[in-house]
Image: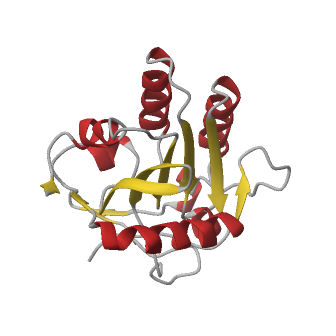
Amino acid sequence: MLHYTDLEKTIHELSDTQNINEYVIISGYVGVVPIKKLAESFAKQKNNIKITLVYGMYGEAKITKSLHQELCTIQNEYSNVTILYSLKPVHSKIYFVRNQGKIKGALVGSANFSVNGMQNYREVLADAEENSFKGFSNYFNWVKTHSINCSSESISFSKTGKLRMDDVQPQKTQGICKLSLLGRNGLVQEKAGLNW
């Protein structure tokens, strides 16, 4: 089944699968709100489902200090939550639940585990077929071996990328502003820039 509305609810309902003790989320990018809501939901239900969240693109994009601090706070606040940062760039979005290591249900698609990924009809998740489960387990094990815990001392932070006004040199002529979109090096950015 394809899901494109209320993805956060879909992700929470995956945990309703009978007899699970672990929820694994591998996401290219992550946000604070979804993991906090999932952890709070499990705490209210007084179940002891372990949540493992992997921030996949850490290996390429690193992480902002503020997001890192908030994720560490969540891991410290909820004893059943483990947050990992993948050292290898991982852009996949896989959600699965399992019991004693055996996957009982899974979703795969384009939705990051972030507020933007869960809303606005922009992303999708689909129920995965059972014949995919072994591959998901193997992939998760590979990602996990190439990841560090968010509490690690060796976290690298991303630069905020904020532009200083000193870097902007607009030319104004007759109500027209010409502003270069090139980087400080005079070149167009390779990635994370404007979509042309």
Q: How many marks?
A: 0
What's the image's color scheme?
secondary structure
Quadrant where the N terminus sits is: bottom left
Q: Quadrant of residue 82?
A: top right
Residue 77 falls left or right of residue 123: right
Q: Quadrant of residue 138?
A: bottom right
**Residue in the picture at 35% in, 40% down:** 115
Q: Quadrant of residue 65?
A: top right
64 and 47: which is toward the camera? 47
**Residue in the picture at 44% in, 31% down:** 38
Name the spot of residue 12 as percent of width and height, x first: 33, 36
For the question of whether residue 164 can be seen, the reply is no
Residue 8 falls left or right of residue 61: left
For the question of whether residue 7 can be seen, the reply is yes
163 and 93: which is toward the camera? 93
Name the spot of residue 170 as percent of width and height, x first: 40, 62
23 and 99: which is toward the camera? 99
Give the answer, above or below, for where 6 lies relative to 159: above
Name the spot of residue 69 as percent of width and height, x first: 68, 36
Residue 130 falls left or right of residue 102: left
Quadrant where the C terminus sits is: bottom left
Give the answer, above or below, for where 4 lies relative to 46: below
